[in-house]
Every structure is written in C-alpha cells, then in structure tokens.
Amino acid sequence: MNRLAVFPILTLMFSLPAAAQVYYPGGHSDAQKKAAEESRAALKYDPHDLSGVWSGVAAERRGGPGGALRSTLMGGTPAPPMTIWGQEQFDAHKPSKNEAPAFRKVPPALSNDPQATCDPLGYPRNLLDGEVEFVETPGKILQIFGIGRRIREIFMDGRQIPDDQDPTWYGWAVGHWEGDALIVDSKGYDDRSWLDGVGYPHSDEMKLHEVYRHPDAMTLEITMTLEDPKTYTKPWVGATQTFKLQLPKGLTVLYEWYCVPSEEETFNERVRNPADGVVGKK
C-alpha cells in the first residue's frame, strides 16, 4: 500500500509549483501571457458566475462646457443639481487627487479628503480605481477591493436591509437574481466618505440601486442609480460601467495596496506638498 501511494504523492508534489503560481492584474510576462491564453480557452461561461478579479474601464473624468465635472464612478454622467446642504458639503470638500480638475484641486497639505488620512474610501468610491474581486458563497457575495483591501458584503439569503443599524463605510446591501441580472439595493452609508476624488458628497440617507450583468465570459457591466434627497434634487442615474476579467482566472490575485497612515504622511511631506509649492504639515 505504501509503495502504491508513492506515485500519486510524487505527482502532486511536482504539480504544486504550477498550481501555486500567481499573477497580478495587468502583468505582461511571457508566463502570464501563456497562462492567460490557456485560461481563456478553458473558460466556461455562466451569467451567474461573477467570481474572479475584474478591472474597470474608466469613464471620462470631466468634460462639457467650462470644464463641467463628471464623476468617473457614475460612468461619466453629470451630477444632478445639489440641494443647499449638498452644495455646502461639496464646497467644503478640498480634493487633492489627480481626478480632481485644476480649479478644485488643492495641495495635499490643504486637503480634507478622507483618503489623505487613510479612512476607508467607502462605497461606491472604492469601485473607482484599481480592481475588484468577486467571491460567491451560498449566502452572500463578497466584493474585495484592491485599493485598501476593503470588503463589501452583499447578502443573498433573502434578508431585508436593517433600519435600526448605525451607518457604515460600506453600507448594508442585499441582492437577488432576476433572470441573468444581479439586482443589489443598499443604504446605511456613513456620510464621512466622498463619492469620488472630485469631492462629490452624500448623506447618510443615500440609497443605491445597482444592476450587474455578465453578458459574456470576459465582461461585467454595472449600472447604478443613486438617490439622496438630502444632497441631490433628483436621482443620479449612472451610465453603464464596464469591467474586464483578469486572466488567468483563479491565478490572478489582488495587489496588497493598503493605505498606511505613516507612509501617506511621509509621501505627502516629501513629494506631493513640495511639488505643489507647500512646505510643512497642514
């Protein structure tokens, strides 16, 4: 019996290096290209299978007469008019990230962007940059965001969104399938987060309605409608945002992109602030 077991064990040992190989999104090594081609050939399309690492195809950050702002997050659709409260919040936000247009952008030393102190980006801002991985379980779908390694739970077990819970950075989301479309509704968002790096605000009354479609093995489409009567005078209806599957599926992993407060502060002091002509801490 021991001798008969030797061959399977040796076979497993020699196959482990190949099985354990991992790749990162956007890699172009010969090994990754070969593995991606093999993975593409082996893909089995299931419109309900969202698992894998997906990279977004960014929309225009700004456009229109006079440099009108557009949120990348909402697929490039312009924001609806704000309420008085919403405009006050928008004016109070001082962005410093690259997506902010020049007439709003300030040096990091003068910014109050929550990301500058490594607060969680929250949702839907975390969908803006980098990659997102979907992990499906019988009772929930997990979205793992590359930026900050944050996790959003979408409950698929038929529960209702709680009305008596404190707001959280990633809200409370429930989902269900309607045919081949995943419908996700969420609310209960902490109003300290921004919608994007431009500085669009939201209140703790914000509700999101999302529709996910998986039209082919390599494509994921998301459309989003934001309702927040405290901040905007009408719903913000987004355009379709397209994401592409990163290959090889199952071997592509997210980068470890954490926002580390000490590193962020040091980089601001040594690089960003001097580049903007600002010296010292804010």
Image: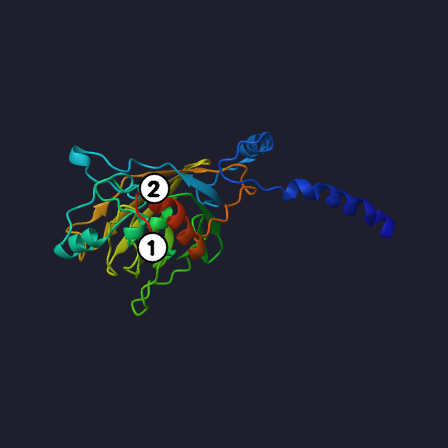
**Element under label 1?**
loop
Q: Disc 1 or 2, which lies upstream in sequence? A: 2
Question: Which residue is at a point 25% across and 50% down the rendered structure image?
Answer: 94
The reply to whether residue 251 is visible in this rendering is yes
Disc 1 crowd rating (10 Å Cα; few below 14, some 14-19, many 20+) is few
Residue for badge 2: 275
Locate the C terminus by quadrant. bottom left
Q: Is mark 2 on a helix, strand or loop?
A: helix
Percent across and percent down for residue 244 are: 43, 37
The amino acid type of the residue labelled 2 equals Ala
- The answer to which of 231 and 238 lies nearer the viewer is 231
Residue shown at 71%/41% (left/top)?
A: 15
Identify the residue at the far bottom of this view. Answer: 164
Tag 1 residue:
281
178 vs 211, nearest the viewer = 211
Q: State yes or no: discs 1 and 2 in contact (Cβ < 8 Å).
A: no
Q: Is residue 188 shown above or below 279?
A: below
- At label 1, the amino acid type is Lys
Quadrant location of residue 54?
Answer: top left
Give how far apart the Cα atoms at labels 1 and 2 are. 14 Å
How many circles with numbers are drawn on the protein? 2
Which of the pair 191/96 is nearer the observer? 96
Mark 2 Cα within 10 Å, few/some/many (few <14, many 20+)? Answer: few
Observer-nearest of 192 and 245:
192
Q: Position of residue 170 (x, y in %)?
A: 36, 57
Residue 75, percent across and down? Answer: 29, 40
In this figure, which colouring scheme has been used for the structure? rainbow
